[in-house]
Amino acid sequence: MEQLSYPMVLDGGLSNVLETMGCNLEHPLWTALLIQTNPELIIEAHMAYLEAGATCITSSGYQASIEGYLRLGHRKTNAELFILKSLELCLKARQLFIDKAHNSPVIYVAASMGPYGAFLADGSEYTGAYSISDEDLHLFHKSRIDLLQPSNADFFAFETIPSLQELRVLSELLNASSKPSWISFSCRDEIYLNDGHKISEAAALFANHPAVFAIGVNCTAPKYITEIIGALKKYAPDKRIIVYPNSGEVYHVKSKSWFGVTDPKGFEKMALEWNEKGADIIGGCCRIGPEHISRISKLFQQQSPL
């Protein structure tokens, strides 16, 4: 993946943009609900980030899994169609932007795949506290990987992975993948994953992985990112580093709401520091919106690619 230009600007949170459009996302499928009910709004949200300057956008497939759709009464064939459609919407947004823009930069599309905890829809991606065998985890992830392997996605994006067990399973599965991937951990602080294992252990799993071109962290408080970058570079020195933290606000699972505030100008300053410390791909997760992405896009336009 050395042909890519860095720093690359990733998009921000999808849910917060959709909520500003009036969408009610209190559903087990979360943003993936709109793949079926209102796909045009997903395209509009992707476009908001492209217009803000993102050069890589992620699909709405984070919460979309075959098991999740089956649990809600859908047939497997329909579940597969919804997952593929999440990517199609992203690709359509890219084409609409390219057709509309003058001198558009190269835009990349990543097929988002969330952790097993996203399927549970109980906030366990923030803890890693789910009991499941390696075999069942393998099947959960393999179904989506196999489905999306022939797709036109530029990358796979495995996001918010909270446990070392799940990372080990993904490491083994992706050995056979022909699609480049990034793996993004969710962390409780600058030392530990959400399940309590060390970030250094997770980074070492992918240090020499043939299909994983970048490792990093998302949906983690911004205050921990600089130290995490250091750990990632130490234990996987040949991998690109991707960071897209949340706003630092606190999510309450029972009320399904966030508490706290975020400042786009402050986020811009932190993004500059993360880039200086070695982050190659920078964006945002929950509660980070187009204004944040616009600021870091303008910031990096003033710099030469790494």
Image (tube, rainbow, N blue to C red):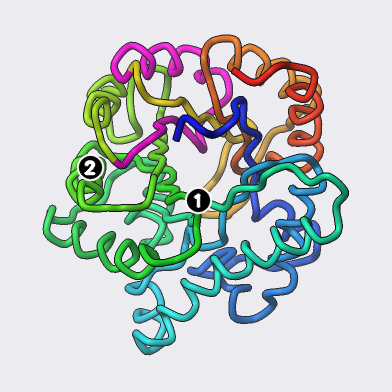
What residue sits right under mark 2 in the picture? 171
Which amino acid is tagged 1?
Answer: Val
Q: Residue at x 19, y 41 (%)?
A: 168
- Residue 143 in the magenta stretch? The answer is no
Tell me: residue 248, above or below residue 97.
above
Query: In this orientation, which residue lies closer to the viewer: 67 or 27?
Result: 67
What residue sits right under mark 1 in the picture? 253
Quarter where residue 144 is shown: bottom left
Query: SS at mark 2?
Result: helix
Q: Which residue is drawn at 28% across and 59% down?
A: 141
Circle nearer the viewer, 2 or 1: 2
Q: Which residue is drawn at 34% across and 16% down?
A: 237
Quarter where residue 46 is shown: bottom right
Quadrant including the C terminus: top right
Is residue 10 left or right of 46 when viewed as pictured?
left
Residue stretch in magenta = 211-236
Is residue 177 left or right of 58 when viewed as pictured?
left
Q: Earlier in the sequence, mark 2 or mark 1?
A: 2
Query: In this orientation, which residue lies closer to the viewer: 61 or 163?
Result: 61
Is residue 25 left or right of 211 when viewed as pictured?
right
Measured in 3D between alpha carbons, the distance from the residue under mark 2 to the one under mark 1, in whole angstroms, is 29 Å
